[in-house]
Image: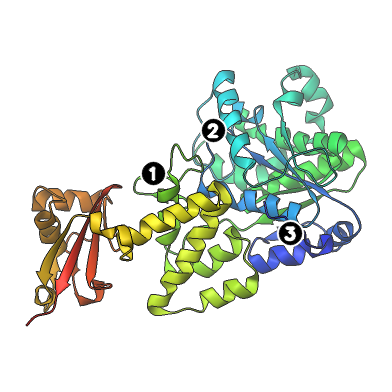
Amino acid sequence: MSDQRLARADFLPHMKERGFFKQCTDEPALAELLATETVAGYIGFDPTADSLHVGSLVPIMGLLNLQRHGHRPIAIAGGGTAMVGDPSGKTELRKMMTLEQIDHNLDGIKSQLAHYLDFGDGPGDGIMVNNADWLADWSYIDFLRDIGRHFSVNVMLSRESVKQRLEQGMSFIELNYMILQAYDFMMLNREHGCRLQMGGDDQWGNIVSGIDLTRRLNRQEVFGLTFPLIATASGAKMGKTAAGAVWLDARRTSPYDFYQYWINVDDRDVERFLGLFTLLPMDEVRRLAALKGADIREAKRVLALEVTALLHGRSEAEAAETAAAALFGGGDDAGSIPSSRRPAADLDGDGLLLIDALADAGLAKSKGEARRLIRQGGIKVNGDKIADEMRALVPDDVRDGRIVLQAGKKRHHHIHLEPTA
């Protein structure tokens, strides 16, 4: 994490400026608290896999920014609630996991969070906890008697996350998730002085329930802050590609492929993503976002470099950048990439059909295989994924005298265009 510490009181304005702020309970009181005390705030992460993915970066960056402002981040690895399942934003019941699977996944998630947060015993150092530590030993009868009696079924059913699941059918187990998460907030307040819960806006109902329970049992004022739910400009879910999720674990998604994900984001997303997922000053974010046309590639390069460096380290990020430059920008290593030459006139008129170019380059055995690769999302031109089987290569595709074709993750070909005599 960056060593730069920011003023405690600036946390909320900072979150608003960078695009994290959706809604907040009693904002004036929270602002006063943040200005006068070191505030512990938490976010929960469900261990449904042994790696988090790009979709988890908003809450991770929320905790990172909390710590950069001198406050204390708490990450809950939800070993207890993972056995129940959170209905928020889901359309079906989550698969149940064994304790062994959960423990394995927790280990992976903890190591990833350590790339972003400084953990230790100091007042601003982060801590990681597992809610199984306080949930696993409860008997059902005791929990109902001592905790369940504080919850109104009418209020629970009115929560938006619950109403959405009721349309598809919701199990009694899932309905209990709200109670368990509320209990987490109360316990973190009691054991660690936690005064703030943050999360995606789909968590608003759960957060408010935790605030109510903490007031009842601990007699203390606590607060909630939610982030906007992030989708790409095209409406797609963050971190989802044709090849699957973009993971934070380098064994699942290599630093190079992680870098390429950010290089290939929609132009319309660049400014928002620079604010959310990097630590660049906002003046620099706005300068980069103002670049137009071909210059937007520079903004994407900076985005990819900075996001990759936060996760994998500066050296891995620079290595990914160098590899990308060799493939797509004419770097010194580009000579090792298979290539061919064509007259520039081949791109005149309606252009050169991509399926023909792929077959001629040996990236597909036939035009039929080329079409199949395009349908499966496995073809890129100059780093941009192609979905149209009838796509033609035209003069606008030429960069530095070449067109870069890619099939899958590892097969590349450069078409060099020669001027017509």
Query: Tag 1: Cα neighbours inside 10 Å, few (<14), some, or many (≥20)?
Result: few
Q: How is the image coloured?
A: rainbow
Q: Secondary structure at mark 1?
A: strand
Depth order, front residue of 21/181? 21
Q: CA distance from mark 3 to mark 2?
A: 33 Å
Residue at numbered disc 1: 244
Instruction: Judge whether residue 84 can be spotted in this image.
Output: no
Does residue 215 appear left or right of residue 100 in this picture? right
> Which is more N-terminal, label 2 or label 1?
2
Q: Secondary structure at mark 2?
A: loop
Give the percent coordinates (x, y) of residue 226: 68, 54
Q: Is residue 147 above or below residue 337?
A: above
Give the percent coordinates (x, y) of residue 410: 28, 47
Give the percent coordinates (x, y) of residue 413: 21, 57
Give the percent coordinates (x, y) of residue 215: 88, 43
Q: Secondary structure at mark 3?
A: loop
Q: Is residue 213 above or below residue 198?
A: above
Residue type for callout 1? Gly
Q: Are marks 1 and 2 in contact (CB under 8 Å)?
A: no
> Which is more N-terminal, label 2 or label 3?
3
Q: Is residue 250 above or below residue 345?
A: above
Does residue 376 appear left or right of residue 258 in this picture? left
Query: Tag 3: Cα neighbours inside 10 Å, few (<14), some, or many (≥20)?
Result: few
Residue at numbered disc 3: 4
Q: Are marks 3 and 2 in contact (CB under 8 Å)?
A: no
Depth order, front residue of 329/40? 329
Residue at numbered disc 2: 48
